[in-house]
Amino acid sequence: MDNETLKTETPAPAERSLNFIEEIIEKDLAAGKNGKRVHTRFPPEPNGYLHIGHAKSICLNFGIAQKYGGKTNLRFDDTNPTKEDTEYVDSIKEDIQWLGFKWDAEFYASDYFEQLYEWAVQLIKEGKAYVCDLSQEEASEYRGTTTQPGRPSPYRDRSVEENLDLFARMRKGEFPNGSKTLRAKIDLASPNMHMRDPIMYRIIHQEHHRTGNQWCIYPMYDYAHGESDSIEGITHSICTLEFEVHRPLYDWFIATLKIHAPQQIEFARLNLSYTVMSKRKLLQLVQEKHVMGWDDPRMPTISGLRRRGYTPASIRLFADKIGVAKRDNTIDVSLLEWCVREDLNKKAQRVMTVLDPVKVVITNYPEGQTEELEAVNNPEDPTMGTRKVTFSRELYIEREDFMENPPKKYFRLSPGTEVRLRYAYFVRCTDVVKDAGGNITEIHCTYDPASKGGNSPDGRKVKGTLHWVSAAHALDAEVRVFDRLFSSPTPDEVEEGQTFLDNLNPHSLEIKRGCKAEAFLADAGPLDHFQFERLGYFNVDPDSAREGRLIFNKTVGLKDTWAKENAKA
Ligand code: ATP
Ligand code: MG
């Protein structure tokens, strides 16, 4: 099949050209490599929750398989029992499914421990691996530096018989942690440090979440990863840039063992401004309770973004927008926010909710009267229809939508001015009531019955439109408003003696109690999305159901600064 026919069968999305990985794949397909199969894998280590960087890798691996009619495996890279746990396995599976992807098969590197052991024995028999007794410090000293070649370990020339015996006894558990390793015998003069007799196995006496106490020697990433790819028939093993220097070793094991050779391809990892992305640091935030948990809405984890109100489509859109680069860079978090706004604008039910209420009394509206006014559910999607909102004599509006002594160009409510109450009427402020401390407790207005629906009766214009709720019909709600978790765009860059924790933003969570929500929200369920008119996008926090009261998270505001900045650029 040549490139042309290939393209007609699997058209690339019209709006963008092929990325460099797709180019490699199309070339391989055209050349008939791997029997024209495309098989990728997503290989998380179950030592933490997935974050937005992983989402990029997931979208890439699953996206490529979808595009080329291939397959994607989910493989847990569970070769280090000290940090791994089934809690993480479960959360990873949940997050991938939520993002909208289905793996073709689920595997664990630990499934291959026996095969990996047999291959290690084979390498020993071929004189290509040896048991080494150097401590970690000694071994790194012997390994040399980038300018100095390494020196051979005193154990490098052990006989095959001795190595086979020692390796078998390592497996049996005869030696303590750290006392011995199995190393590949490659090249101590290589300019690539990874080729200077890298460690294949280390001794760790620790129960594994799947293999229990069956093993006390565990393969290193470099030895396990390529072989696992090979066993599964992976064609393109996509990983992040830091593994580029590992690629000669990846290829060496596979070539030496003479097994199926997947191609490792590296791309730039995602870095986001105002956040940290290493699992170690995210774990520290959780363990030291700087956040509510892995799914805290301020976390860059997939579970955090979900709880914050991000949709799977918005994260997939983000992954698509940032593309696949060969050089590391940092993406502005406002692009991610732009993506969720873009998606929710199309989907979110509109409602009116007042976060900081002040009472309005419509003095010429009959006491005890109510009426049902028609409100549009989503102006972007007429199929979502309309709903009724209840109007009455006593309402709440946002405290900041009223000013007693307004500056020029203040288009909201002030004494003597007229504004529109959304979907309802024109109202004009007549006077205010204050408490002993001078705080406004009630705003008095009159309404114009001829302006029903918020339409001008005589062509006269009002500049402001306010959201409101009927006091007697509103629901009480708590609203959690978030700011960035870190106050620095680069939290990892710290002064001497500081850590990334010193960059935490002390004001990243504001809890607003006593908010007043439109009665429509009575039936809102966990994670349901809404646009609170004029305020932004919000969703129902799962705490809502647990605590039996309405709790919302602010997903993102309505303002679209990223697009504006980009339009300028
Ligand atoms: P961390 O450094 O956060 O601990 P990791 O690379 O150790 O992450 P893994 O579970 O090993 O996490 O990663 C699974 C896959 O996700 C790997 O292929 C890895 O390259 C990819 N990945 C991890 N972080 C990012 C990122 N920031 N951007 C893109 N891909 C990533
Ligand atoms: Mg890793």
Image: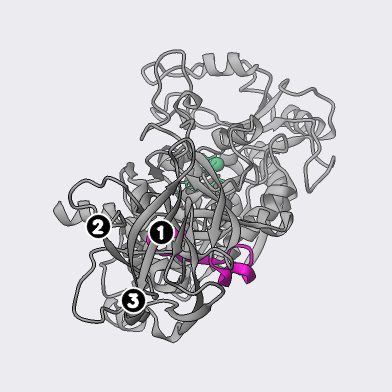
User: Is 545 on the left or on the right of 349, as rendered?
Assistant: right
Position of 135 with respect to 320 (left or right) is right
The kind of residue on which mark 3 rests is Gly
Specify whether residue 263 is in view.
no
Note whether 346 is above or below 135 in the view shown: below
Q: Which residue is mark 3?
A: 454
The relative height of residue 236 versus residue 458 in the rendered view (above or below) is above
Q: Position of residue 250 (x, y in %)?
A: 50, 44
Mark 3 and mark 1 in contact (Cβ < 8 Å)? no
Q: Residue at x 77, y 28 (%)?
A: 166
Identify the residue position indicated by label 1 in the image.
444
Callout 3: SS: helix
For label 1, being within 8 Å of ligand 1 is answered no
Secondary structure of residue under mark 1: strand
Disc 2/disc 3 C-alpha distance (Å): 16 Å
* Quarter of the image where ligand 2 sits: top right
Given this view, does label 1 or label 2 mark the residue nearer the observer? 1
Q: Amino acid at mark 2?
A: Phe
Residue 399 visible, this angle:
yes
Say which of 449 and 499 sits in front: 449
Q: Position of residue 126 (x, y in %)?
A: 63, 39
**Residue annotated with mark 2:** 411
